[in-house]
Amino acid sequence: MDAAQVIDLGRESLWVAVMVAAPLLGVALAIGLFVGILQAATSIQEMTLSFIPKLGAMVLALAIFGSWQIATMVDFFRRIYERIPGLFM
């Protein structure tokens, strides 16, 4: 296994991690921003107010994007396992 293969594998791993995490992080960012603006507009500074909507939105996002995330990771690991025989030649 030469350096180019290692770099390619690392790049692909990071890209899959970003793709899998992006929907959940994007939803958390959007809900957190919305609740933060709402708190600033109403002067309600309750720390737990942002937790419940964010948790609910993340559960909903996981229900929507979860099967795609699993399929993406399974496809990536399948490609990794298919590379194993060629690594030692």
Image (spheres, helix red, strand yellow):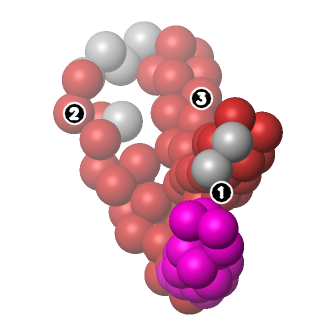
Residue assigned mark 3: 33
**Which residue is the site of mark 1?**
16
Mark 3 surroundings: few (<14), some (14-19) or many (≥20) residues within 10 A:
few
Answer with mark 1 or mark 3, whichever residue precedes in sequence. 1
> Does 72 appear in magenta?
yes
Q: Tell me where the magenta segment starts and ends, as one range.
A: 70-89
Asked if disc 2 and disc 3 are in contact, CB closer than 8 Å, the reply is: no
> Is 21 within the magenta?
no
- Residue 89 rendering spot, x and y as whole percentages: 64, 68
Q: Nearer the viewer, residue 86 or 12?
A: 86
Q: Dot 3 lies on which element?
A: helix
Label 2 and label 3: CA atoms lie apart by: 15 Å
Per the model, the C-alpha gap separating discs 1 and 3 is 26 Å
Query: Which of pointers 1 and 2 indicates the residue nearer the eye?
Result: 1
Q: CA distance from mark 1 to mark 2?
A: 32 Å
Classify mark 2: residues with Cα within 10 Å, few (<14), some (14-19) or many (20+): few
Q: Which residue is pictured at 24% across the width and 23% down the height?
A: 47
Mark 1 crowdedness (10 Å alpha carbons): few <14, some 14-19, many ≥20: some
Amino acid type, mark 2: Thr
**Viewer can see residue 72:** no
